[in-house]
Image: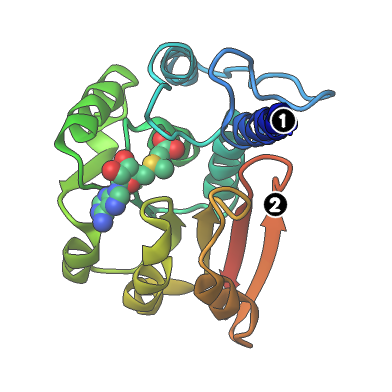
Amino acid sequence: MVKKIIVCLVAVVMFICTEHSIAQGTGDTPDIPAGESPPIPKTDAEKKILDVLEDIYRNQRQGMMNVPPVDGRLLRLLTETTNARHVVEIGTSNGYSGIWICLGLLNRDSKLTTYEIDAGRAALARDNFKRAGVGHMVTLVEGDAHDEVTKLKGPIDILFLDADKSGYLDYLNKLFPLVRPGGLIVAHNMVYPPPDPRYIKAITTNPRLETIFLNMHAAGIAVTLKKR
Ligand SMILES: C[S@@+](CC[C@H](N)C(=O)[O-])C[C@H]1O[C@@H](n2cnc3c(N)ncnc32)[C@H](O)[C@@H]1O
C-alpha cells in the first residue's frame, strides 16, 4: 500500500514538473514550436540583440522566471505592429522580455518603462540592456510597482503585466486610464502559475475591452484591446 502511494506521488510530481517545464521553458531546449524557424536578424543592431537574448536564454535563465522565447517573439510582434512608442512592463527580472520588447521598438522615437522590486535582478537587467545596445531606450524603475506606477504619465501603447500574479488587477485598475484607446494590455501566465480569477473576470466581462488568449500551449498570454 505504502509503495503504491509512493509510486503515485512520484507520478504526480513528474507530471507537474513536465507541465511546468512546458509552461516556462526548460532552459536547455529552444522553445520554438515545430514548423517555426528562429528569428533572422535584418541588421547588425538586431543581430546584437538576438545574440544577447540567446545568451540570456542559455546562461541566465535559472531562477529568472523569463517568458519563453515564443512569448518574447509575440511581444516583439505586438510592439512593432502597433507602432508602439511607450511600452510599460511590470516585472523586469533580468530584462529578457524587455529586450524582446525593445526589438519591436527599434528605429523609432520610443521607450520602455519597466519595474523591478529585486535589486539583484534589476542590476542584471541594466547590464543586459546595455550589452544589447538598448539601454538608452529603457527606464528601469526599482521598487514596488504598486506604488511606483502611480507616478507614471501616459499615454501607454502597451502595458505588459508579468510580476506578482495577485497584483494584476491592481496594476490594471491603476494604469488602465493611461492606456491609450486602441492600446493593449498584455498579461503573462494565463496557464501557469494559475491566473487570478478576478483579473480574468475584469478583462473578459467589460464591454470596453476585447480579450483573446494566446500561446496557451506555453505559459499563456492574454491580449486585451482597450477599444476606441
Ligand atoms: C516573472 S518575473 C518577470 C520576468 C520578465 N518579464 C521576463 O520575462 O524576463 C517577475 C518579476 O517581477 C518582480 N516583482 C514581483 N513583485 C513586484 C512588485 N510588486 N513590483 C515590482 N516588481 C515585482 C519579481 O522580482 C520578478 O523579477
Please, what is the three-letter code of the amino acid marked with disc 1?
Ala
Q: Which residue is mark 2?
A: 214
Quadrant of the image containing the C terminus: bottom right
**How would you rate the neighbour count of disc 1 (Cα within 10 Å): few for under 14, some for 14-19, many for 20 or more?**
few
Judge whether 143 appears above or below 41 on screen. below
Ligand 1 image position (quadrant): top left
Assess mark 1: CB under 8 A from ligand 1?
no
Q: Is 127 rendered above or below residue 161?
A: above
Disc 1 secondary structure class: helix
Picture coordinates of residue 69 (x, y %)?
58, 29
Camera-side residue: 152 or 188? 188
Q: Which residue is mark 1?
A: 11
Mark in the foreground, 2 or 1: 1
Q: Which mark is residue 189?
A: none
Q: Secondary structure at mark 2?
A: strand
Where residue 134 sits, quadrant-wise, is: top left
Residue 68 seen in the current view: yes
Type of amino acid under label 2:
Leu
Q: Position of residue 57 (x, y in %)?
A: 48, 19
Q: Give me the residue at 52% from left, 48% from top.
A: 79
Quarter of the image for the N terminus: give it: top right
At 59% across and 70% down in the image, what residue appears? 225
Q: Residue at x 44, y 61 (%)?
A: 157
Q: Measured along the vertical axis of the image, is residue 96 above or below residue 216? A: above
| CB within 8 Å, label 2 to label 1 | no
Describe residue 121's horizontal placement relative to residue 21 as left or right. Answer: left
Q: Is residue 185 left or right of residue 6?
A: left
- Measured as percent of width and height from the top left, residue 221 is found at 61, 52
